[in-house]
Image (cartoon, grey):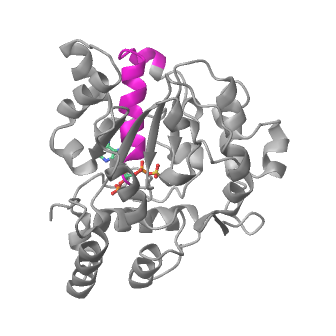
Amino acid sequence: MDKYVTIEEFRELRKKLFTDEHPHTLGEYEGVQLDSGICEMMDELKSFKVRADDCWIVSYPKAGTTWVQEIVFCAMHDGNLQEVNKTHTKLQVPFLEHSMPEEVRRLKNLPPTHRIADEMPSPRVIKSHLPGQLLPPQIWTKKAKIVYVIRNPKDLMVSYFYFENLLNLKGAGLPFEEYLEYRNSNKASEGSWWDHYLYFWKRRHQPNVLLLRFEDLKRDLRGNVETISRFLGKALSAKTLDDITEHCSFDNMKSNPMINPDYLLSTDERPGRSFMRKGKSGSWKTHFTVAQNEAMDALIKEKLHGTGLTFDH
Ligand code: PPS
């Protein structure tokens, strides 16, 4: 993407989004709520040409996408961190369905993201938050590698709550109680987290799928860096695995201007308002009331009953 825009230009274009002129609105595509702009692209995305040597990072938002994406990108580049740090990760890893509105892109002749991805050399790392059934069908016939990330849905709620407020998305401004109701309904963007999770949970044993948990990355980052590298067919040295682990620690990712999305997304610069917010497991404990926790437990039980998918407390 850096062939089309510099980091500064991207930042300037991005400032125009989610304002009164370009508010964040949702539409519906095949029964799933998505950003209106994404709905308009969806028919075209179905014929997106997937390559067998792609690695896709797929997730429900706020599950740990950026973290896993960075590990994958580093491993794909054999741990060459100089190469990895050359430009911002957001310009190196196309976010398949996410393009700025045409009138904004036109200011810099920036094509939609999927067309830029079409031109990128192999091997590509591609990010998507689309639910499995809406991903380009070739992802299954070409057997591209897919790393799918899940996170305790309670922490996902907290992280998404702050994110929607940070970027002025559809759910911004709602009190936490109402936000929980919104995000736990089919009216939320990207559909319900449980449908999203279960699509990949059911496919987790397919050889081209690696399902990871945010909580496991927190417990053992080095081990997960190794698992991801092996999945990508990379036999990296212990030193390289150590370096990637260090590069992908929360503090390093937050302080690395080529990773932390704050600058690119033109987020609110007040202290404490950051994409890289806390990076912890269990944040929900300081946000949920006892009643909210009970309601969420009941929902998790109802939606995941009989699937084998559970979450630590
Ligand atoms: S997005 O917008 O969907 O791409 O967001 P996503 O990247 O999926 O999730 C953002 C949350 O992941 C946390 N994060 C990390 N945690 C620990 N270590 C590292 N290295 C790391 N990188 C990102 C980020 O802080 C968000 O979680 P919260 O709980 O809001 O802090």
Residue 262: x percent and y percent?
A: 51, 47
- Identify the main secondary structure in magenta: helix
Q: Is residue 214 above or below residue 110?
A: below
Residue 157: x, y in percent?
A: 37, 68
Q: Residue at x 35, y 17 (%)?
A: 79
- The image quarter containing residue 136 is top right
Q: Which picture quadrant has residue 249?
A: top left
Q: Is residue 228 left or right of residue 215?
A: right
Closer to us: 277 or 90: 90
| Residue 279 horizontal side relative to residue 97, left or right | left
Magenta stretch holds residue 66: yes
Vertical position of residue 263 compared to residue 50: above or below: below
Horizontally, is 249 left or right of 93 in the view?
Answer: left
Q: From this viewpoint, is residue 254 visible?
A: no
Front residue of this view, candidates 285 and 226: 226
Q: Which residues are magenta?
A: 63-83
Quadrant hosting residue 35: bottom right
* Location of residue 31 in the rendering, given as x and y in whole percent from the top left corner: 59, 68
Which residue is drawn at the image coordinates 43% and 55% (left, top)?
Answer: 60
